[in-house]
Image: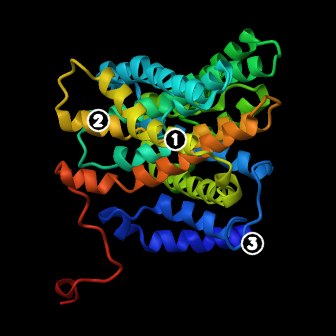
Amino acid sequence: MELVFVFGLMLLLSVSLSGLAARTVLSTSLLFLLGGALLGNGGFGVVDISAQDPVVAILADIALFTVLITDGQRANLPALKEGWRLSGRALGVAMPLTMLLITLPTHFLLGLDWTTSFLIGAILAPTDPVFAAAIVGRKDVPLRVRRLLNVESGLNDGLALPFVLVFIAIAEHTDTHWTLIGLELVGGFAIGIAVPALVALAWRLKVLTLEPRLQPLGGFAIAVAVFGLCHLTEANQYLAAFAAGATLATIDRIAAEHFEPFGELLSEVTKFGALLLFGALLTPNLLSHLSAMEWVLAVAIIVVVRPLAMYVSLLRTQLPWAEKFVAAWFGPKGFASVVYGLLVLRSDIPNSQLVFELVAITIALSIVLHSSTDVPIAKRLRFEPPDNLPHGEREDSERS
């Protein structure tokens, strides 16, 4: 129960400071990460947890699923059609280029074999919808940039997964079951479309009516059904989540609008819980294993590789330089990479601990850098942060 108590306290603190965080470099995500690090085994030892603990993988899995299904709603069919040219560049050019630019220095600077180097590249190539939401959720950022980052971060997790599974299989010297991997991806996509589509069509029948107070639970029920069905069939739940959100928003926009506020809160709660656990894993013992070259590589992946790859993909587009800069910089690493790193940690590949440590420190640095730069960059580029948040008190004019 210590974990529940700590989570409750951190949640209360973060909610209470959320208005301040929206105006400054303070970030609720960063608060949970630091809280986990201070209260974990590397700090005061209040939260006793290890990377092998099943709750870590389960919570990261649920957090990523809830975020993807809510992000999918913002990337419905009309939105995909409108912004596909930019999103296609991000997915078709920036993502494979990022993977390559991570693989090469990993192999030549760290001396790891090509398979392990490509595996690290595949794990760290996707961006994360949780932390991209810091920009995607800002109404002051141009819509096309938000749509680009949203679609990119929502789709590249599923696109990276086959490469992660294949490279793990090769590193373990086991047979690579291409058919099985393909079926998992196709199955996730099919479930993500079929379940919300059938439910949305059924809701059009006169005999089925949703009581207004319970309408937000309609989308939640779909999400739970999709999540459970994917685990029963071993389909890719991440691709299914994004497809389900997009399908629901395309076929039944009203149901999606009722679910969206509830879904956003749910994704925030699961995100904070996973961040707390992830922070608890960042012990001094883990960090001390990393060499100076590994630290340099982790910084370069965030500061050089991602911005360069995205900027190259956006060449010859009509985006202003400021929007290109925002799109290039905000490529945060997060839960997808955490989940894939945990897959590696549970595998039998050589250097599995080193791979996880490098992934973990890259994600931690990304959280610190990206979650603390969204407001300053928005101010610098005149994307003004919200200034009309409630303060918990009435103004004097309102009292009178």
Q: Which residue is mark 2?
A: 145
Look at 52% across and 57% down and name the residue there.
213
Residue 341 is situated, as x and y percent measured from the top left of the image, at: 67, 38
- Please, which colouring scheme is shown? rainbow
Are the two marked residues, 2 and 1, in contact with CB atoms closer than 8 angstroms? no
Give percent across and percent down for residue 399. Answer: 22, 88
Q: Is residue 173 visible?
A: yes
Looking at the image, which is closer to me, 131 or 293? 293
In the displayed structure, 81 sits above or below 227; it is above
User: What is the three-letter code of the residue carrying label 2?
Assistant: Val
Q: Quadrant of the C terminus?
A: bottom left
Circle 3 residue: 2
Tag 1: residue type?
Ala
Residue 66: percent from left, percent from top = 57, 44
Secondary structure beneath dot 2 equals helix
Q: CA distance from mark 2 to mark 3?
A: 41 Å
Q: Residue at x 66, y 54 (%)?
A: 288
Q: Amino acid at mark 3?
A: Glu
In the image, is 184 to the left or to the right of 86? right
Using the image, tell me which numbered label, if any, was put on residue 298: 1
Asked whether the residues under the numbered discs 2 and 3 touch, taking CB atoms below 8 Å apart as contact, a structural biologist would say no
Tell me: 329 left or right of 62: left
Give x and y (percent) for residue 155: 49, 27
Whole-number angstrom distance, CA of label 1 to CA of label 3: 32 Å
Given residues 126 and 183, the one toward you in this image is 126
Which one is nearer the viewer's eye here, 359 or 48? 359
